[in-house]
Image (cartoon, helix red, strand yellow):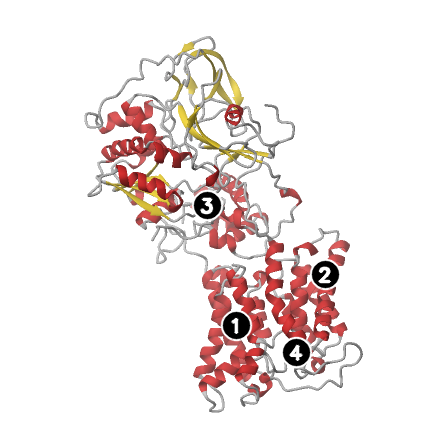
Amino acid sequence: MAMNKQLQVTSHPHIDIAEDTRSIMLDVIIALSPALVLSIFYFGFRSLILTLVSTVSCIVFEFLYRKLMKKSNTIGDLSAVVTGMLIAFNLPVSAPYWMAVVGAAFAIIVVKQLYGGLGKNFMNPALAARVFLLSWPGIMATWPKVFERAPLFGSTVDVVTSSTPLASLKAVTLPNYTLMEMLLGQHGGCLGETSAIVLLLGGVYLVLRKVISPRIPLFYIGTVAVITYIFPRGGLDNLQWMLYNILSGGLMLGAVFMATDYATSPVTRGGQILFGIGCGLITVFIRYFGSYAGGVSFSILIMNACAWILDKAFRPRRYGVPTWKKAGAKK
Amino acid sequence: MALSFRGGVHPDDKKDLTNKKAFESITAPATVVIPMQMHVGAPCKPLVSEGNLVKMGQMIGDSNAPVSAPIHASVSGKVIAVEPRLHPNGCMVTSVVIENDFNDTLHESVVPKGSVESLSADELIKIIRQAGIVGLGGAAYPTHAKIQSCLGKVDTLIINGSECEPYITSGHRAMLETPEEIIGGIRVLMKIFRVDNAIIGIESNKLDAVRVFEKVLPQKNSPIKVKVLKTKYPQGGEKQLIYAITKREVPPGKLPGDVGCAVFNTDTCAAIHNAVTTGMPLITRGVTVTGGAIANPKNLKCRIGTCFSELVAAAGGFKDEPFKLIMGGPMMGTALTDIEIPVIKATNAFLGFLQYDDIYSKEQVCIRCGRCVTACPMNLMPLYMYMYYHKENFQEVLNLNVSDCIECGACSYVCPGRLFLTQTFGVAKIRLNQHNDSDDTKKGAN
């Protein structure tokens, strides 16, 4: 029985799981889609165009950078698409399109590719881009009113704006939206962060698909909930204060989609738990004492810098060595 | 509640291709090629030379080394060559080539050794050694050496019927078809270790085998018990199995005997039983011939030294030209360089894969998803070991306990970035061991 073709001879294992980087990124895109659809419903097609501009920019920057640096083409892994969507989700719908392009360039080139590309960046690219874009505070603090349509093209300065729940919380008052409106996202805010319920839906999808572990989102949101419940400000009702706090700002988007970013969060169980708690503490700290209304972006970026050390601190116990024995100190 | 361990993966087991197919014996081939190295440890020296006539069951290779197992002729006939031949491991290994006279004349040494009760533990160990028995789950560690390494330390005898590798069903079929042989072997081991109980661990995807044992064993106060294990890879890993059944963890660098356990494969037990009751050394074995490239996947009983090409022919040939041939399972098996390679003692399966795994065109990127950490049954952090290894920070690789890696392949299997994790650690262990030996004096302090 002669073998005509050459046999492939490789070291074991000889089979792979079906999931790969691309399928995981596709799952994230699917999980983000309901929030995009809802934002089109709330803010009109401008939010779709803004997302497309941001996404296409990310793909183009990634392609061009890697082409110029004579590196492999990686746009097929879809990670640039995820970054692009997240950048747009962190912008008010009235933001000019060029801002999405600038954000995409910063996220892809500076934060992601200069550090070696996917998996090597130490900050979440989309969040870093958002914080970079806060250099235009006027634009980044204009919040169009829900169901008011910002013009698709041209200036958006005339758009009807509304206050954000975060601004109310900063002023130690409960937002003038009902909890149901908060849940559905019928309030001012970035285009992707408004509806807690669809973001949670996306999170549940990711957990069911085993793309993310629920640890970081649960401990993040849980920490915010516990602290705001115990320490409400201005003598407001504990429960209401807590509920408005966890439904406001980018908390859901941040906890479900940003803090769980693989490259910038710990891989160990204990590390993930502490990462979530740390994000929650810093978020509340900034919301209570910071001069900026929102704390989610900053808290996640700060914890991003701790991911590596958390993994080091929470290394799994060595097999066969009880926890109370120092690892390696055998005999 | 099925017993289990931490970590592990759930590959599609593909056992339905062959788990309903009873063993078929294939006729001994015209020539057999018997390598002098079919086990972990020292290779055997041939005891015969070209032109000698040998009988079936005659010892044709042996070694004085403590970790080694003798090798026997699987047919009767004439030795036509003693020369290096291609071995499943890809190397040329000294092999005895025997031309079959198709008489199957038994050697004088192949006689029943007496009842288990009448034989002493030492005599039984000697019979096991003389029969050339090695661990038949795939590792092929000489069984007598394993017994001696933990003699006097064992309180729990564990029989490994988990067969956690996908595709393989030869152990499963043996449990269904000849459970009394397995139980006979367990009784021998119980006598040797002076223990009055043994536990057979079987994965939950083989409940029919569990029922067979429950039928064969006495209902009440049976010294041999069957426990159902969760179907999860690598459930059959020695340390994982011990943990699942006893909740004891084997410390790093220690052996199962150090936690009072000894683990033997079900097929090994059957071989022990046959060696004692018939005197027949290990010269045949069951092989699952399966995979997408095989026309009619089957379980075959064949003589050791039969070429894989004969097994494939008996299984209806190839459907299409295969791209990969594997001896053993897809998680830990060895990819073969050719098909004209003999079945050895450790061969529990032969797989033919059609689909070309285009590994080199894939972008290998760690996205830090952490799946490898979750999957590792040894509590390791594969992604960091991989990263430090490729940055040549070997001290950190050692600090992360790469030496604990059992190379089960679970991390590579789940990696969405398709990193060569297991493969890297295999190389790292060899390289860093050498590196370690040279500065042992420095390390001795801690």
Chain letter for mark 1, please. Answer: A
Q: CA distance from mark 3 to mark 1?
A: 34 Å
Asked if residue A193 lies left or right of residue B350, the reply is right
Q: At 67% across and 70% down in the image, what residue appears?
A: A87
Chain for numbered disc 4: A
Measure the alpha-carbon separation of dots 1 and 2.
29 Å
**Residue at image location 59% in from the left, 53% down from the top:** B366
Which residue type does callout 1 highlight? Cys
Judging from the image, what secondary structure is the residue with disc 2 in?
helix
Query: On the image, numbered disc 4 is attached to which residue?
Result: A42
Foreground label between 3 and 4: 4
* Among the 4 quarters of the image, the one containing residue B268: top left
- Of B45 and A201, nearer the camera is A201
Between tags 1 and 4, which lies in front? 4
Along the line of sight, which residue is nearer the eye, A76 or A328? A76
Image disc number at residue A59: 2
Q: Earlier in the sequence, mark 1 or mark 4?
A: 4
Q: In the rendered view, does A330 fall on the left or right side of B190? A: right
The chain letter under disc 3 is: B
Give the Cα separation between the discs numbered 2 and 3. 39 Å
Q: Residue B261: in sight, yes or no?
A: yes
SS for callout 1: helix
Please say if the residues under marks 3 and 4 sit with CB atoms less than 8 Å apart.
Answer: no
Measured from the top left, where is residue B412 in percent x and y?
Answer: 53, 47
Task: Determine which residue is flagged by label 1.
Answer: A279
Query: Is any atom of residue A191 visible in this view?
Result: no
Residue on which disc 3 sits: B405
Mark 2 neighbour class, 10 Å CA radius: few under 14, some 14 to 19, many 20 or more: many
Counting from the top left corner in percent of width and height, residue B265 is at: 36, 36
Same subunit, labels 3 and 4: the answer reads: no
Instruction: State the separation of the CA atoms marked 4 and 2.
Output: 27 Å
